[in-house]
Image (cartoon, grey):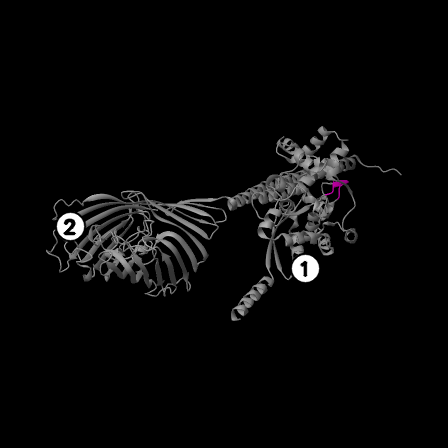
Amino acid sequence: MKLKLFTLSVLALFANIAAFAKNIELLNVSYDPTRELYQEYNAAFAKYWQAKTGDTVTVKQSHGGSGKQARSVIDGLSADVVTLALAADVDALYENAKLIPQDWQKRLPENSAPYTSTIVFLVRKGNPQHIKDWDDLVKTGVSVITPNPKTSGGARWNYLAAWGFAAKKFDGDETKVKAFISALFKNVPVLDSGARGSTTTFVQRGIGDVLLAWENEAFLSLKEFGAGNFEIVVPSLSILAEPTVSVVDKFVKKKSTETVATAYLEYLYSDEGQEIAGHNFYRPRNAAIAAKYASTFPTLKLITIDQAFGGWTKAQKTHFADGGVFDQIYAK
Amino acid sequence: MTFLLSSKTRALLAISLLAIGTTTVRAQQSADELSTLREQVRLLDQKLKVIERKQELKDEDAATAAKTAPKIALTDKGFTLTSADGVNAVKIRGLVQLDSRLFFDDKGNGLVNNSFVLRRARLISEGTFAKNFSFQLVPEFGGSSVSLVDANFGVTIYKALQFKFGRQKSPVGLELLQSDSWTFFNERTLVTNLVPNRDTGILVTGDIANGTTNYAVGVFGGVADGASTTNADFDNEKDAVARIFVSPFKNKTGLVVQGLSFGVAGSIGREKTTAGRTSGYKTDGQQTFFSYLATTIADGQNRRLSPQVDFRKGSLGVIGEYVISTVNVRPSATGVKTELKNKAWQVSTGYVLTGEDSSYAGVVPKNNFDVAAGTWGAFEIALRYAKLSIDDAAFPLYASASTNADEAASVGLGLNWYLSKTVRFTFDFYNTKFGFNTAAAVTPPASPSVLHQSERAFITRFQLSF
């Protein structure tokens, strides 16, 4: 009888231990300009998850050029989730290391892009070089700041937006388009590895006449460094940038964090997640919340990666792979 | 209305208008020049900023690369390859000891013991993986054949709780636990004959109480006095080994006794063997002066107890230890069982003449030996006394009184020259006197020749240790 009682007590103790709240740590490997977004979002998600499950979630963040970040994960940085600048960088996790399934983009709504953005120009107060559109960036004496498309997701969006403009202007004449892009990059004195580095170059180091920036990064610069110092110029045409997110299956299975990591990304689509995105100058997907921020974001003509370039896989291979168009142009 | 101006007035007016016009043109030119200069300054400023930013980015890249690049270090502690995050490391070290042994006044017939000896030649590899897992591999190329001295791996839970598995030093003898490279003398004292050397087992160790106390508890296969495991456990029994060593004043800066450490170590186990229990006890000159009869076997409990002390104060270092080794033996498988107690003690001291600190981990010269620079390294003198006594009951049933000494007492005098942290010359003179059991037919015994006289040995060593 005593033995039975003892056994039951031990079982009850184990049951209690199992019922104890857990401390969970996630690693979100993201691209350069999302620091502020995820600082706010992580706190909101931790609160939500604790209320739902009782577990405490701490999310660590890692930021850098989107391409570099993808490389780090491929090389073994055990990210639970990636929230990168473009689908091609997330694709690389499948292509190079089979860390995620091939159809990863179908697992979440909106092709796993919970918010969008675009590319705009940030110029110095008064716009002394009178920069209004992409044409102005190729003029002699105009200094353009953009990161390196080989390492930065934002830079690839910049490049493709410029290409889209030139393609329209020259009616698809590829020779002229290449010459246009080549002239633009001749005006780039410094290639940072990531968007945040380029912002530092332009805003804090005072280099260049115009920064090709994520819309959210441009707004953040105005907020952080004062609207009196900079102005946003919206070009006649830009590109719909769709930063994408994915759970890194191989690592979450190993770390037993699949459930919470999936919930972490799903919550980006919640009202609170979308509010936080809008609040941090990303364009929300949720129509109602997007409407709330409509006055923040200018209306402009946006081309899409699928329409203009046949999707990221093709664009990546054509323009940014080793020996691709960018390498050919930049080598000249 | 007509104004009539004199020719003088007209001339003055013309000059004035010309002057105004010239000034206006000059002002315009100056404004243009200023504008051009401003633009040039702006462009130069941009160029300068770009250069600075590029350098900044290069520095950032270099710093990032440094964070991920493995670090390679070649120091007086060996060659170390460390991962960027510091959690993985592999270290290659080495130890070479070349001895010259010279014995004085030997009276034995045909005694050949003056020799050069490659005492130790070890290529030591050590490493740490994932911060908490370590290994050590020490092959021995000195001696008559290649052997494996140490081969173990460790798991660190906390600094206070560490596990070590495999072949390693059994933590009983204080002097034995000190590295071969840094003992006061080139050979350890008689006391080390009575403690286990390398053994295979599991050790739990750690530093506790703010690092003032080191403890070690282990289970080993069990080896005879002074012996190392041959990788073949000779019975089913195991030895339990424990040691506690306290440095109570370690953190009390300025106290005279800050460098005082003391402790006690012991082992206990049961052993049953089918052959002789020990390869013999050796003198400072590494000559055997006692061994059991080949028919003697161990059968029963064996115990060792060793109080020990270490003191360091500036250039002065002193260590002392006492060992009592108890073994139950039979003269044959069916013979009477007797418990024997062999005892030994020693006190050794060293003093660094050149002012460097004496240390359990060796002396580091302030200046390496360098004739060109006029520096000579560090010099240390050392003195010691040690005595080992065999239980009288060992004679004659378990050991021959006619071929063994039952006591050895040794005085050692040494000079150590540290040319650098890695290179040391030692010059040691040992005088060992033997005592004999009353059961001996003649004193000294007819053989072996080493017992015909006191051992007076001059042993010099060249040592490279990194």
Give the quarter of the image for residue A87.
Answer: top right
Query: The numbered mark 2 sits on a residue in which chain?
Result: B
Question: Does B340 appear above or below A285?
Answer: below
Residue at the far bottom in the pictured view: A2
Q: Where is residue B72 in the image (x, y as percent from the top left)?
A: 44, 44
Q: Where is residue B460 in the image (x, y as percent from the top left)?
A: 23, 47
In front of the other: B158 or A295: B158
What element does badge 2 sit on? loop
The answer to whether residue B19 of the structure is visible from this angle is: no
Whether residue A219 appears in magenta in the rendering, the answer is no
Give the class, few, some or many, for how many residues have Cα within 10 Å of label 1's Cα (few <14, many ≥20).
some
Q: Give the amino acid type for the residue marked by disc 2 in the picture.
A: Pro
Q: Give the amino acid type for the residue marked by disc 1 in the picture.
A: Tyr
Q: Position of residue A309 (x, y in %)?
A: 72, 36
Relative horizontal placement of residue A167, taking residue A10 as reference (left or right): right
Q: Where is residue B378 in the image (x, y as percent from the top left)?
A: 29, 51
Query: The numbered mark 1 sits on a residue in which chain?
Result: A
Disc 1 target residue: A48
Which residues fall within the magenta stretch? A234-240
Give the class, few, some or many, for how many residues have Cα within 10 Å of label 2's Cα (few <14, many ≥20).
some
Q: Are marks 1 and 2 in contact (CB under 8 Å)?
A: no
Disc 2 target residue: B448
In front of the other: B78 or A148: B78
- Please determine if labels 1 and 2 lie on a single subunit: no
What element does badge 1 sit on? helix
Relative horizontal placement of residue B356, taking residue A153 as reference (left or right): left
Whether residue A237 appears in magenta in the rendering, the answer is yes
Give the quarter of the image for residue A188.
Answer: top right
Looking at the rendered structure, which numbered label has been put on residue A117? none
Residue under the point 48% across and 44% down: B70
In front of the other: B190 or B461: B190
